[in-house]
Image: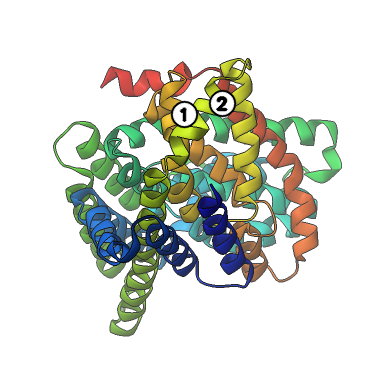
Amino acid sequence: MIEPVLVVVLLIGLIGMGAPIFLALGASGLLGLWMARGPLAFFFAPTSIFGQLNSFELIALPLFILMGNLLSATPVGTNLFRAAAIWLYWLRGGLAIATVGASALFGAVSGVSVAGVAAVGSIAVPQMLERGYSRGLAAGAVVSSGALAMLIPPSVPFIIYGAVSGVSVGALFVGGIVPGLALAGALALYIYIRVRRHPEQAPRESGPPPRPAEMLRALGGIWHALLLVVIVLGAIYKGIATPSEAAAFGAAGAFLIAALVFRTLSLRSLGQILASSVKVSCTILLIIGCAKIFGDYLNLVRVPEIVTERLTATSLPNWAILVVLMLALVLLGMLVDAVSLIVVTTPILLPLIVALGYDPLWFGIILVMNLEIAVVTPPVGLNLYALRGVCPMLSVEEIVRAVLPFVAVQFVMLMIFVLFPGLSLWLPGLL
């Protein structure tokens, strides 16, 4: 079958020439449909786009993006880091570990990893360098922990995967909690061990310890946003609201926090936030819609079935097939952005995962853990460039070298959750 090869070559060629990903997906998928069904392809394509985007759950996507952008316009990220740094004053490497904690909490606020790197990194890196922390430890801690926003709900990648796969977004949110906390704990543990072995990388804090009143005041700048996240996610987990309804409440609450509590909104900044949210949302939705054209062509020529049949017919054990798939996804993530990777690979790999006897919910969690590695590895790792943008004193090459040990920790955690699926499924099973 030469047609699928031509379609894939066109897709790779367009991406290589710098064409927008939605155009590459839509054009290659349309070419495939035209070769398979002739002029009817021009009727199939619009139907594919409409069918994919005509989903109530997808309403949560722009609303959570708006919620994150509104809270990113407030000092929440800075306040989170300062509060964590004060409470971990006694611990060697406390500022770096505080960065992990602040990024995890900010991930629960924004759901966008780049926003977390920018918000936390802009204050954390200068503070750590000023106190004598090594540049590698400071940069690596910020970039790697910023990726936690992709896994800790409300997570934009989970919404996209749910729309493509049909898996409940609420169940994905619940399933992301344990892996997200475990990964945050692993990064913090690595930092602790590293600074114990190399004390010069994180000098102990000097000066008097913070007073209890100061520690309590540090929480005053973050409780509003954390309470909003608890209410939003609690409404989803308890079944009180759908993810889309909870996202609407979250966006409204974020507006009130930014406008009334922190008073950081003006008409101009609100317009910029709305414009940015619309732009990002439309970009993602356009990619999802055009990827459906590509996915429908693959299904039409039975590519997912062929891949499933070939791999399940091998003598390899299931765990070996999974490890190979994870390595392939990590490599693809180094070259393709997260949204595109989800919408392109899910239709191909999900039938294989089901045929191997695994839960689609588990695969969604594992896929997003892969994406966490993707956003911190070159050449497409957006978190690398986000940190470079807010910390010009660091070079991209320096940031890449700094993040490699943290990537190793992330990969080890990925393999643990790959080989032991029950770790990520037990919490959703309780609800």
Report the residue at 34% width, 52% height from top. Answer: 225
Q: In the displayed image of the protein, which residue is found farthest to the left? A: 240
Q: Is 240 left or right of 90, judged from the image as shown?
A: left
Q: How is the image coloured?
A: rainbow
The residue at which mark 1 appears reads as: 352
Residue 85 seen: no
Residue 311 image label: 2
Whether residue 181 sits left or right of residue 109 in the image: it is: right
Which residue is at the front of the view, 73 or 302?
A: 302
Badge 1 amino acid: Leu
Residue 114 position in % (x across, y down): 52, 59
Q: Residue at x 30, y 46 (%)?
A: 163
Q: Position of residue 177 (x, y in %)?
A: 41, 32
Q: Residue at x 27, y 59 (%)?
A: 44
**Secondary structure under badge 1?**
helix
Determine crowd level at label 1: few under 14, some 14-19, many 20+ residues with C-alpha closer than 10 A.
Answer: many
Identity, as a three-letter code, of the amino acid under mark 2: Leu
Q: Nearer the viewer, residue 239 or 11?
A: 11
Is there a contact, CB below 8 Å, between mark 1 and mark 2?
A: yes
Q: CA distance from mark 1 to mark 2?
A: 8 Å
Which of the 4 image quadrants contains residue 358?
A: top left
Rendered image quadrant of residue 310: top right
Judge by depth and name the residue closer to the eye, 125 or 127.
Answer: 125
What residue do we see at 39% from left, 67% from top?
A: 283
Figure label count: 2
